[in-house]
Amino acid sequence: MQCQTFTLRLGEAGDLERLNAFLGRVVPIQVSSSLVQGSPAFWSVLVFFEGDAPAPPAKPKEAAKPDKVFASSNAALFEALRQWRSVKAREDGVPPYVVATNSELEEIIQAMPATPQDLEALKGFSKIKREKYGAAILELIKSAASRED
C-alpha cells in the first residue's frame, strides 16, 4: 500500500484537478481529509492506494468544463449518475470522487457499457469498483436507455 498527500488550497481549482487526475490513475483504498486552520486555511488529503505511484501525465489535462454539453438524454443520465454518486458517497462515508470522478462518469456516458466487463474496461473501474458499484451504474444506464425508447 502506498500513500500520497495533497494540499487543497481554498479557491484553487487546480489543486482539486490534480487530486482528481491522480485518483483517476490509481485504485484508492482509503481517502481521508482534514481542514487545516491557518492563514490561509487549506484541506490536507491523504490517499492510500494500491501499487506504485504513477508518474503524472506528461502534458497537463485540460480541466473538465462544468458546462459540458451532452445530448439531452445523456445530460439526464449524467445528472442521475451524479445524484447516485452523492447518495452512495454519503452511505459509504467517503467523498463523491472516491465513488467516481466526473471524468469517470463522462467516460461511462461515452461508452454506455452494458455488462460488468464493459464497465471494468473503462479507465478508473477496477474489479473492486465494478463489484461495489457496477450493478447500480448498469441499472441507471438501462433505465436511461428505456426512457429514450
Image (cartoon, rainbow, N blue to C red):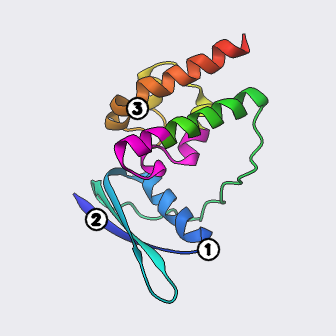
Residue 85 belongs to the span the image colors magenta = no
Total numbered labels: 3
Of labels 2 and 1, the one closer to you: 1
Q: Position of residue 134 (x, y in %)?
A: 42, 28
Of labels 3 and 1, the one closer to you: 1
Circle 3 residue = 133
Circle 2 residue = 3
Snapshot quadrant of residue 130: top left
C-alpha distance separating marks 2 and 1: 25 Å
Question: Which element is circle 2 on?
Answer: strand
Residue placed most toward the observer, 107 or 89: 89
Residue placed most toward the observer, 114 or 99: 99
Quadrant the C terminus occupies: top right
Which amino acid type is marked by label 3?
Tyr
Circle 1 residue = 11
Q: Looking at the image, which residue is at 50% across and 43% down?
A: 86
Q: Check the image and report above or below for 42 versus 112.
A: below
Which amino acid type is marked by label 1?
Gly
Report the side of 111 relative to 49 (left or right): right
Range covered by the magenta-colored residues: 87-106
Of labels 2 and 3, the one closer to you: 3
Snapshot quadrant of residue 128: top left
C-alpha distance separating marks 3 and 1: 31 Å
Quadrant the N terminus occupies: bottom left
Q: Looking at the image, which residue is at 38% across and 41% down?
A: 91
Label 2 close to label 1 by CB (< 8 Å): no
Residue 102 belongs to the span the image colors magenta = yes
Q: Check the image and report above or below for 125 versus 142.
A: below
Q: Position of residue 56 (x, y in %)?
A: 46, 65
Which amino acid type is marked by label 2?
Cys
Question: Which element is circle 3 on?
Answer: helix
